[in-house]
Structures are given as C-alpha cells and as structure tokens.
Amino acid sequence: MPTSRRGSGSVTLPSGQVLAIHHRTQDEEDLPHATKKTMADHLRKYETIFTLTPQRMRMIVEAFKDTLELGLEKPKQIVPMIPTFVFGWPTGDETGDFLAVDLGGTNLRVCLVTLQGKGKFEITQSKYRLTEEQKQEDGQKLFDFCAECLKTFIETNLGEGAVKDGEKLPLGFTRIDHGELIRWTKGFGALNTEGRDVAEMFRESLKKHDVPAELTALINDTTGTLIASAYVNPNTRIAVIFGTGCNAAYMERVGDIPKLKNLGVDDDASMAINCEWGAFDSFEHEHLPRTKYDQVIDETSNKPGEQAFEKLISGRYLGEILRLVICELIDEGVLFLGQNTYKIESPYVLDTAFLSLMESDPTEELLMIIGIFTHFFALETTLAERQFFRALAKLVGRRAARLSACGIAAIVSKMNYLEDGCAVGADGSLYNKYPGFADRVHEGLQDIFGDKGRNIVTYHAEDGSGVGSAIIASMTKIRKDKGLYAHV
C-alpha cells in the first residue's frame, strides 16, 4: 500500500476506483494533511490540464471564425448568429422617454429611461424577484407576470395623468432573441415558449392586463449592451457578456449575411448580430480543451452536449470545476482524510464567488480560504493546501479569461478591427467582479495577436438591458417613422 502521508494511504481497486485509507489511535488528535511537496506535485499536473498556450488559442480562434461565418451563411446552425434587425449605430442624439423590461436570470427589471442626447441619459428602475417556479412554468404565465409588474411600475413612477387615454409608451423588451425563441439559457426552462413568437406572447399579456405600453423592440441583452455602449463611447465595435452566461454582439454588413440575401435591405446597411456564442463547439466537441471535469459538468447539466463554450467560461460553472478537482483529490486520499467531507461533495455548493474571494487581496485571501472551508464545509486546511486551492482557482479563472479572449479575437479578426483597434464593451458578474479577469483577457489578446493585441481594449459596458433597450426602441421608432425597412 503506497503511503501518501502519515497515518493514511490509498489502494487502487480492480475496478479502477481509489480507496482512501486513514488510520490513527485515540492518542493522535492531529488530522493528517497533505504535505507541501504533495500539493506542488498535483498542482503541476493541473497546470498542464488547465493551461492554454498561445498556439492552441490561435487554433481555437480560427475554428471560432469558421463557426461564425457558417452561422451567417445558413439558418439553424449551432452558433445561430441571429439577425437582430437593429440597423446601424446610434447617433448619440436620440431623445425621449422609453420603457424597458429586462427578463434576467434572477430578476425582472423594469426601467423608465430618459434619453437626453449627446450620449446622456437618466434611468429610474425597479426589480421584481423571479422564483424558480416562475422560470419553469408555462411561458404565457411568465409574460403575464412581466405585464403586471410593468403596469405597477407605470402607476407608481409616472402617476395619474402621465399617460393619456389611448396613449402608449414605447417599450423595449430585453432578454429573448428576435422573433422565435431559439433556446432558453440562464436556467430558464419555461414551457410552451421554444419555437414560438414570444413578441406576440408578450403583446397578448400587455393587452390582457391593459398596460399602456407598445412593444417597439424585442432585443437580446448583449445587443442592448452593444448599442448602449456605442451611444456613450462611439469607438465601441463589440459587446460581450461574461457572467452567469456568456455572449457577444457586433455590427455586420448586411451583404455579408448570406442567409438574409432575399430580405430586400441594402447590402451596405449594417445590422447588429446576436452571436449566441455560448453554443460554440457544442455536440461535436472538436475544438475546445475540455477536461474530464468539464465533461462531468456537461453530462450532468439539464442540456447535455449544448452550450459547450459557456460551460468552460461561465460564472455558473467555474466553482463547480474547482469543486470536482477537490473531490477527485479527496477520493484519491490526498485531501481531508479523517474529516467528514459530505458538505463539499454536493454539486454546485462551491460558488464561483468563492473563487473570486480566493483571488482577492493576497494579504487576505489565505484567511478567506480558511473561512470558506471552515464555515461552509467544516473542513480544516493547512497553509500548503490553502496555497494549492488559491493556485488552482487562478488556473480555472485564467483559462476562462483566455478562452473569452479567443471569442473576442474571432470577431476582431473576422471584421479586420486589429490594425485600427476598437473598444469592447464588457458586462457580467465575471468581468466586473472576478479579480484580474479583464487583465487576463487583455493578456490573452496579446498572446493571440502579439503587441497589436493592445489595440483591442475592453471596458465596463453601459447598461444594455435598460438603456440599450430604450435606445433601440428609439432607433426603431425613428427608422419606421421614416419608412426605412418598414417591412422587417
């Protein structure tokens, strides 16, 4: 029996499973812990597994570009490259009062946005909590709830007489793709919605509850982020979301969207594309560096095989990747022998927020790790183990950021933005709150493009689902009032 540490060991059974063994007497109070050398040896193994080389990143970028092109060429592709029918960039001079409804992962947000022109705006908003039951029940009931909240918001914030009889305020609805719903993400599984015209479903609910609002624009949150960011920063060419889910949007020349060749729109017109790139490399799994931990997450998810890119970089999954590695080391008899580990063995108990704490201020992060393992999982750790957890969290977070850079680089390369450079509006909890995430994205862009990668700069995006939705509602109203592309 090979001994892994004092008083403990492991045996490999004929089935291939590892049986961890721990032995102590009544006189021994100290729990066994892995040595610094043991943890260093394991860390080297995980560095090999989770590290992305520049060469591998460039290969991913090329495959990503091909996938984006295919989505523009043909409908119903894995990365669908959804035409949003949002034409052109905002001028910055859009003005007026507009309503916006944002159906997010955990909340319904209702906003009143006053566009003041010259890239300025004011926003008033309210949030309504969504229960798990509401996210899973019949889709029409979900839209009824949205309509009821919107009506309450109007009555509360605008007061009597603010909306005249027969008048309807322009409304932008954010979260769901243009027209038919392709697939729910962010934990939604509402019945009777996939493949249906959700705009019509929401209009039914607005009419049913007598809400004085007219649905002018139905947009995706990433498209809203693109337009809102460009309204404030005209150098913006791409928007990305790195949070519970992940996505990107950018502006494409209509003539370069073959699947829209019969649309009757000028080839030189520009249209925002909602990539839905979280699905990149789904089903076939040919390009992304999936580990056995990623495979476990995929196979145990509610939609196995789908959203392959998202499952490697999304804030929903990073904590679970770390937990699976820790559980593997528990099973191998390396960690926590003699301690009850049942609390950490439940899926998704190690939130990605814990990873961000592990990578916080270096003077505090090791204390944070003590607190996390002691308070949440009743586990004692040594300095060597805490240093290992911190390094492992960095590996997982760094891989996510570098893969995120691959997605940005694919659009930059496709649109020839590298020479002149561009701004990338970025939003989402991972980008905004995970320590060092943005810096690692920039590092990844430089590894892919060399020094010219410095020309691509990400920055904290403007509010896409509120302000962006309102700006798009304004742009759509102006376009249709002019009779421009009124048939789409």
Image (cartoon, helix red, strand yellow):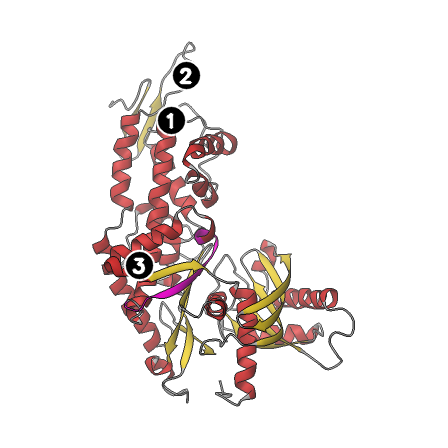
Q: Amino acid at mark 3?
A: Arg
Would you say 166 lies left or right of 366 here? right
The residue sitting at the front extreme is: 118
Which circle's residue, 1 or 2, is located before the other in the chain? 2
Specify the segment rendered in magenta.
Answer: 419-431
Q: What amino acid is labelled 1 in the image? A: Leu
Among numbered discs 2 and 3, the one appearing first in the sequence: 2
- Residue 440 locus on image (x, y percent): 34, 50
The answer to which quarter of the image holds residue 262 is: bottom left
Q: Residues within 10 Å of mark 2 (few under 14, many from 20)?
A: few
The location of residue 466, given as percent across then percent down, is: 57, 65
**Residue 131 in sight:** yes
Residue type at mark 2: give it.
Asp
Write down the quadrant of residue 388 in the picture: top left
Q: Say which residue label 3 marks.
A: 454
Dot 1 surroundings within 10 Å: few (below 14), some, or many (20 or more)? some
In percent of width and height, residue 418 lies at 29, 66
Q: Secondary structure at mark 2?
A: loop
Residue at the spot x=36%, y=23% of the render?
33
Check disc 1 and report the residue beneath it.
383
Residue that badge 2 annotates: 30
Q: Is residue 87 magenta?
A: no
